[in-house]
Amino acid sequence: MKKMEVFKKEYEYIKNIELLEDYKKLVDSLPDYFFEIPASSTGKYHPKFSLGEGGLVRHTKVAVRCAYELLENPCIGDKYTKREKDLMLIAMTLHDGMKSGNPKEKYTRADHPLLICEHIRAQQNSMIKLTEEDIEFICDVIASHMGPWNTDYLTKEEILPKPKTKYQNFVHMCDYLASRKFINVEFDNKNDICE
């Protein structure tokens, strides 16, 4: 499987060519399982379209599409710069990149936002040219994407930050919308959202 090609449609949303190149490289660096597993390891927390093989990719595509559509609306999108929009769209694609840990575990890791942030930071200089500021922006919005569900499953201890900034709240909102069971999204045979 050519990982970079899975998000071909989503790449079209990015305006900055340099960011686009790093975006593709970061997608290519995601673990293979990301492209195979369902969005919910138990099937309880996501709609039907995001269950089964490839469900996490479909969930991610819906989250990115929610973000894109909202950012295209001037009443919402005009609150952000072009670069901020691009960075939030990249973050939406990567937000669940280590959902089952690294290496893969049976269930969703409660700290998966922190794991993907570590992974992104580890790619700086060796593979990607994103600035420190861009990486911190992406990691900041990913770290809080779980919103109020920020505790360890067993200890009930808070392990993730809650969204506070407009950027964090936006990313959380798009992920939250993409996980609602009442939403029904149709996909074509390439796992792209039907128009």
Image (cartoon, rainbow, N blue to C red):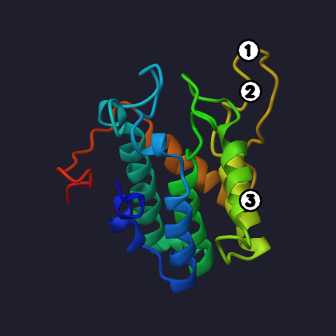
> Which element type, helix, strand or loop, lies under badge 1?
loop
How far is mark 3 from mark 2, CA to CA? 25 Å
- Residue 32 in view in this figure: yes
Q: Amino acid at mark 3?
A: Ala
Contact between labelled residues 2 and 3, with CB atoms less than 8 Å apart? no
Q: Amino acid at mark 1?
A: Leu
**Residue drawn at the location 82% of the way across and 23% of the way down:** 157
Query: Who is closer to the viewer here, 94 or 106?
Result: 106
Q: Of tags 3 and 2, which is closer to the observer?
A: 3
Percent x, y of residue 156: 77, 18
Which residue is tagged 1? 154
Percent x, y of residue 54: 35, 40
Q: How many marks?
A: 3
Percent x, y of residue 188: 18, 51
> Which element type, helix, strand or loop, lies under badge 3?
helix
Dot 2 surroundings within 10 Å: few (below 14), some, or many (20 or more)?
A: some
Outermost residue, top side: 154
How far is mark 1 from mark 2, CA to CA? 9 Å
Q: Tell me the number on the disc at residue 122.
A: 3
Determine whether 50 is above or below 22 in the image.
above
**Residue drawn at the location 39% of the way across and 65% of the way down:** 10
Contact between labelled residues 2 and 1, with CB atoms less than 8 Å apart? no
Q: Amino acid at mark 2?
A: Thr
